[in-house]
Image: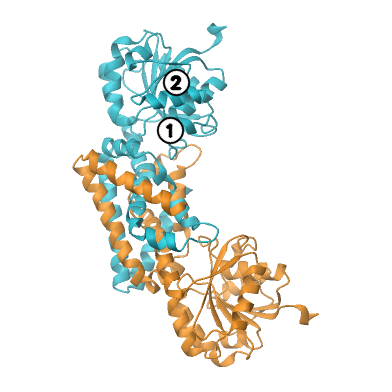
Chain colours: A cyan, B orange
Amino acid sequence: LDSQIPFPRLALIGVGYIGGSAALAARRAGLVGAVVGCDVNPESCRQGRARGVLDDVAESPAAAVAGASLVLLAAPVGSLSGLITSIAGHLVPSATVIDVGSVKLPVVVQADSVLPSGAFVACHPMAGAEHVGVAAADPDIFSGRLCYLCPGTRTRAEAVTAATRFWEGVGCQVARLDAALHDQLMAAVSHLPHVAAYALAGCLGQVLPLVEANAMPGGPTTSLRDTLRIAASSPQVWRDIFLANRDHLLPLVVALEQQVHALGKAMANGDAKALEAALISGQANRRRLLK
Amino acid sequence: LDSQIPFPRLALIGVGYIGGSAALAARRAGLVGAVVGCDVNPESCRQGRARGVLDDVAESPAAAVAGASLVLLAAPVGSLSGLITSIAGHLVPSATVIDVGSVKLPVVVQADSVLPSGAFVACHPMAGAEHVGVAAADPDIFSGRLCYLCPGTRTRAEAVTAATRFWEGVGCQVARLDAALHDQLMAAVSHLPHVAAYALAGCLGQVLPLVEANAMPGGPTTSLRDTLRIAASSPQVWRDIFLANRDHLLPLVVALEQQVHALGKAMANGDAKALEAALISGQANRRRLLK
């Protein structure tokens, strides 16, 4: 019976890897009934149907949320403000709206002002972000992964309960965190590593002919593979994250640039002591960060 | 019978993670008889005995190589020149000398001049470099991994055969490469990723209080874990590698610094187009590098 399904109608706005994976996992767990999708790219909706993510496709975000008990905003962070504005007048009174973005304060502030019903719960499931596109959607990626909830000042308690039910239902471990603190923490433990990976990948363009002419038997080094893994992530998703969180991120990017410069200077000067001290310090920081 | 053992006496100069792992693997494969070790740190020799790596400990490199059929130099790259000089007059005529360093041209040039018997084969087994210390030695790390051989102009064919037998015996896939080309290639696919990882780890010192005060349920992000993995490597080993290969490495370090700067500048300017273009380029480079 539909009445036993927690969310009889799910609207998925932004049909990509994370949203598609969440919808598949929710369907498998019996959390959702019909899933209706909407994306700026019609091809994503076509793939979403083919992948079994979507039952139906809507022409606009406003049309998608009509009658939806749960709205999952899974578009790049930079488009959330416009999406929230465009759906605000079309939600049913009991609807819960959640997102999956990696930056929380801007969307919390905007939803608090535009969705005064308190329907919005800012969410950040931390899973599989280097994959791109709904065709690769995988319902298993949330198993055991952390999902931060960052309710705003106006968020209804029932909406937090609904969001918790959804994310725990797809396999996440849910934790609450202040939105500003979330953004500050993510700048350090997620966004800056992405800057480092993209910068490394970017500057290696000049050695592509060398590397391709001397392909390594058995494939590239594991050090290259691991340090570049997250540079596979969506450029559009990460462009938006970097811009949305730049107040927290920029000071760290400047510090990263200074560290690279200091290592290069120690090499250029043949300064073994300074070089060793910098590596010892980095090694010690790593141990504390990952413990 | 000892005569059936390919290398009846192995001298291990530098008793650490890689050398210890190679000695354990060689013993297990029946490649070596007695293993005698020597290290500047007596504690490493003590641990080497406890770990089953060493049968005997020598007072000096010269004493260790006396009577050895195979000499494995597994000390940091910066100490190889001194070690080669100190053992040169003490090798038996049929001995083969191999190393495990990540920079090849300097040691090849030096061995060609100091060991005119052609005993030296420069080797680079690419395995497990982020682990530190003989106590962690693991004979399985070479299985299926690439080992480059970079013979010098004077290297005897018999020495190359012996080195190949040793590395294939412990599980490696052996490939030959010109020493200068090896160093140029490693600067790109291994040494620069280490610079990036150590720089990231170094600049995150300032966020340790934030990260420790907000420990993430389930542990840190996988992006942080993967990008920092190789910053666990030995600071002494990597100090030497960075200095020994700085002619190839420094231009790439400068390029990395410029990339980080460019990403920060695009963020500061709110330049979404420039940011996206840089990320698209990095993502495309990664795909070509790792294919």
* Residue located 36% across and 39% down the image: A186
* Residue located 57% across and 6% down the image: A1
**Residue B266 in sight in this render:** yes
Q: Amino acid at mark 2?
A: Ala
Residue extending farthest bottom: B89
Q: Is disc 2 surrounded by few (<14), some (14 to 19) or many (20+) residues within 10 Å?
A: many
Q: Looking at the image, tell me whether mark 1 or mark 2 is earlier in sequence order.
A: 1
Q: Is disc 1 surrounded by few (<14), some (14 to 19) or many (20+) residues within 10 Å?
A: some
Out of A46 and B95, give the one closest to the viewer: A46
Residue A249 image position (x, y, % from top left): 29, 43
Residue B242 image position (x, y, % from top left): 39, 69
Disc 1: which residue: A133
Q: Amino acid at mark 1?
A: Gly
Residue A267 image position (x, y, % from top left): 32, 70
B227 relative to A23, above or below: below
Classify the position of the N terminus of chain B by image quarter. Answer: bottom right
Please state if A24 lies on the left or on the right of A103 as rendered: right
Q: Quadrant of residue B280 in the image?
A: top left
Using the numbered discs, state the Cα–Cα distance from disc 1 to disc 2 in whole angstroms.
24 Å
Kindly identify which numbered label has been placed on residue B111: none
Secondary structure beneath disc 1?
loop
Please tell me whether mark 1 or mark 2 is closer to you in this view: 1
Secondary structure beneath disc 2?
helix
Q: Quadrant of residue B181 in the image?
A: bottom left
Q: Quadrant of residue B252 in the image?
A: bottom left
Asked if both marks, 1 and 2, belong to the same chain, the answer given is yes
Please state if B47 lies on the left or on the right of A286 as rendered: right
Kindly identify which numbered label has been placed on residue A163: 2
**Residue B228 in sight in this render:** no
